[in-house]
Amino acid sequence: MRLDVGCELIYTVETPTPMLLMLRPRSGVGQWVAQERYEFEPLIPAMEYTDSYGNLCQRIVAPVGQMRIQTHAQVEVADTADTAPGAGFTPVAELPDDTLQFLLPSRYCPSDDPQLGELVQRIVQDVAPGYDQVAAICTWIHTKLEYRYGVSSVTTSALQTIEYGAGVCRDFAHVGITLSRTLSIPARMVVGYLYQLEPMDLHAWFEAYVDGRWYMFDATQAVPRGGRVSVAYGRDAADVALSTQFGQAQLDHLRVWVAQAESQA
Amino acid sequence: MRLDVGCELIYTVETPTPMLLMLRPRSGVGQWVAQERYEFEPLIPAMEYTDSYGNLCQRIVAPVGQMRIQTHAQVEVADTADTAPGAGFTPVAELPDDTLQFLLPSRYCPSDDPQLGELVQRIVQDVAPGYDQVAAICTWIHTKLEYRYGVSSVTTSALQTIEYGAGVCRDFAHVGITLSRTLSIPARMVVGYLYQLEPMDLHAWFEAYVDGRWYMFDATQAVPRGGRVSVAYGRDAADVALSTQFGQAQLDHLRVWVAQAESQA
Amino acid sequence: MRLDVGCELIYTVETPTPMLLMLRPRSGVGQWVAQERYEFEPLIPAMEYTDSYGNLCQRIVAPVGQMRIQTHAQVEVADTADTAPGAGFTPVAELPDDTLQFLLPSRYCPSDDPQLGELVQRIVQDVAPGYDQVAAICTWIHTKLEYRYGVSSVTTSALQTIEYGAGVCRDFAHVGITLSRTLSIPARMVVGYLYQLEPMDLHAWFEAYVDGRWYMFDATQAVPRGGRVSVAYGRDAADVALSTQFGQAQLDHLRVWVAQAESQA
Amino acid sequence: MRLDVGCELIYTVETPTPMLLMLRPRSGVGQWVAQERYEFEPLIPAMEYTDSYGNLCQRIVAPVGQMRIQTHAQVEVADTADTAPGAGFTPVAELPDDTLQFLLPSRYCPSDDPQLGELVQRIVQDVAPGYDQVAAICTWIHTKLEYRYGVSSVTTSALQTIEYGAGVCRDFAHVGITLSRTLSIPARMVVGYLYQLEPMDLHAWFEAYVDGRWYMFDATQAVPRGGRVSVAYGRDAADVALSTQFGQAQLDHLRVWVAQAESQA
């Protein structure tokens, strides 16, 4: 299917403020960016580089006053999520080199915390190693944690979310990543757009590496859905902030949209 | 200035034919891709990866029959070329690691050929090391070589172009790169779009590393002009073919356009 | 000076256990590995790859029974630490792309924690931005935190170390990194060897990016010393574990040595 | 088997001369560097970086006078060559992204030359696509080209070697690479050490990507042998020069040795 996605951000700053943005989706496996638009108003110099995860990152200095950022893309993506119940665990010794970093603990996914072992063992009891373990983790998150705004903040870790018993998509992804890693399954964060998300917003989910490839998991949903545009990948939310500001920048306005578009080629 | 650039290619193939394309400009230093469009007709799966030079490369398998590729971009670029007469030679010992590969000989730029030494010494005689040497090389190419179609082919090297005394933009760039490298000045190929090129086509030029940064040089012109959109960088044309086909694919149609656009943000 | 450094590790495992090791120093700026030895007993297959920070990482599967790992290197390094009191802050907008990741919060360096702001402002009050701020942070750590074993564990974060008021070299580095990042100064962890460390062990310190380059800081010492061999770089200890085991591997023995050697070439 | 390999180079220079060296083998798949030594006499500052192929490259400025470079390594490698008669052709559409660059023509491997098509078709007539095609190319080289010193120089291309009917290991590798690429089989140059080479010297061979992995081929031998230590990989000899000098540096002495060593761990 072809999705028409985008977001508009309006910031006000009082002194010139450096910012990093990760708002440009890339074409990749299962995702083709057919059309795109990325504009600043007022028109300012912007630079772009690729980070160590392959994400396109934009650098700007927000000028004094109000600045509007508008991104827009038409992207061909799969209608349905690619699932693989029963797909086996990839032994650590057989993991590709570049997946190993996704086994390590990270800022919001402290998978090295010793108190997680018992929990994860309870969740995956009697579950076959691999895909089904990650699916069991998602089911546990979906049924045991409440999706609720206001419980967590941008500094909330997976441990805290488990303790609070509630969180939002970002927190659910952090819990899924953390518990997967304790089972020696590489797991990474994805931020992007999801078709028919309610209420519409930017979204976060995760991917786990089983049976020789990455699979998408989304613990916010009972059944994983397609219609996703990935914008950035990382070890956790620390790596994939859609916007990082070095100074005071007030976000006055954020609007996100995802709609189905006609394939036009 | 904002440029509206693009190209349309129509291929006919008789069996499914793998192709590599390098048709998507990237935002970078001095170049901001504000809008973009990249469509295949019929709609086919396409993948994208980043090569070792940082270029975005698209992989497709052209389906049997006729296929149309259309790319289109609006890009903010500098109006004028950034020149630096007198800028000094960067000693090899001070070159950044990633520039060193652009000192090596390559397919169409056999800078290790011993017969080049005398020629380049004659060209840069009494010229200060650095920017001015490269400028002198460009002047030599521009005045001594004839810009003429039909003399060279896609396998023509810089040595052959010097021998023939004629070539097109790609050949001129190869000669400029080759002679710069013999002076231990890193030089790399650029392909892209140039505003007001006559006749309109895709264009090739080169960059040389002097005084601590890359500068643009274009031996097809008496005076270097701005209004350029870079699409791909490499050691020579072998690395930056806009299209590489593995099998028989007949190019029925190629149209290229570059126009000035309104900055719209 | 030339240092003769090395370590010996003996592990016992009961089932074949995948391990990642980071025990091979690389030649780089200011560090030349003139001789090296890296042996496993029994002899087992080992693979090596380079991670996203440029570290050499070894992958093995520890066989059942006892395994001895012995590494040894003779390395040319600087006698004295390179210090630069007064060196200025590099504005975020001028930081090289690859330093930006070292501004982000990480597992043990939660620099996004809001309670740190007041502390760091108190520490760097009246201190010129840049090198002197990081030096002030080191002095604060050195004088306010107690160097004591047994307070922290491998999962202790910089926040916890500040709270406990004590820790070891790794913890001191985490605090230094965390506080530097809150000032928008990129900071990264280094693990390696230090000449005349008492008691001898592997060591951890950090580097901060000011005035256009990385400088070494070591909060465990009143005055920064030279005689250092860097083995691995990362965002914090999560990235630079000298050994990561996926399963039960008991470390029976660890011996580390650093001695001055004759330059022999 | 464990090999004890090394080389000694003595240069004389009259002015300080920048040099690039590629003399340090890396541990990798099927190759473990257990011991190593890399010394300069007189002792000079040396830097090391990793190039885009993953090779370790050393940068020095040779001082006025005589300079001795001595490298030495003990490396665990396979006794026998890994062969796979019948292994199939990997379709271009299934090649990993990072193998695609090894399909492109390069300085000494002008695989885009139209006159090669007929030759390669004659060589691989009735041969199954994949491994056997590359083996047939090696057999053709081994039987049709004469191994002879003095015919070729460091600027000789594969086309010239075919024309001359003779060359050395480097030339044979270039011919093998070039002809493989014309069949859309990725092929890359390897330089390193070979046990029991007669006369002893540094050696060059190539690898071709078939059936989902790289295989070693060596057209200088009737039957491919093991006992190889790889030092550098590249598109052709332009990328893997063991030494590149920017100025006049006279090589007074070169000694190479490869011997079997006791595994000592």
Image: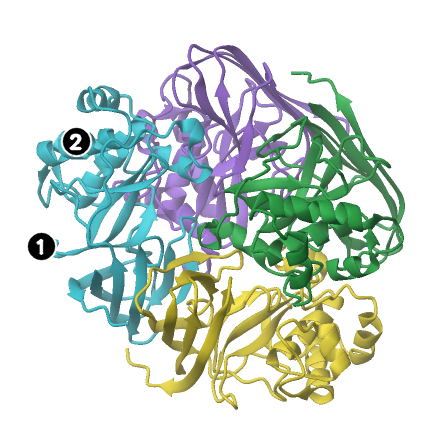
Chain colours: A purple, B green, C cyan, D yellow
* Quadrant in the rendering for residue D63: bottom left
Q: Is residue B45 above or below residue C44?
A: above
Chain under disc 2? C
Front one among B211 and D101: B211
Mark 2 or 1, nearer chain start:
2
Q: Is residue C157 visible?
A: no
Which quadrant is home to the C terminus of chain C?
A: bottom left
Residue plotted at (80% across, 61% down): B163
Front one among A38 and B226: B226
Alpha carbon separation for disc pair 2 and 1: 23 Å
Q: Is residue A48 left or right of residue D70?
A: right
Residue A45 position within the rendered picture, expressed as x and y whole percent measured from the top left: 56, 23
Question: What amino acid does circle 1 point to?
Answer: Pro
Q: Is residue B66 above or below residue D125?
A: above
Residue C162: mark: 2
Q: Are marks 2 and 1 on the same chain?
A: yes
Q: Secondary structure at mark 2?
A: helix
Q: Are marks 2 and 1 in contact (CB under 8 Å)?
A: no
Which residue was labeled with disc 1?
C199
Front one among C245 and B189: B189
Residue A73 position within the rendered picture, expressed as x and y whole percent measured from the top left: 66, 27
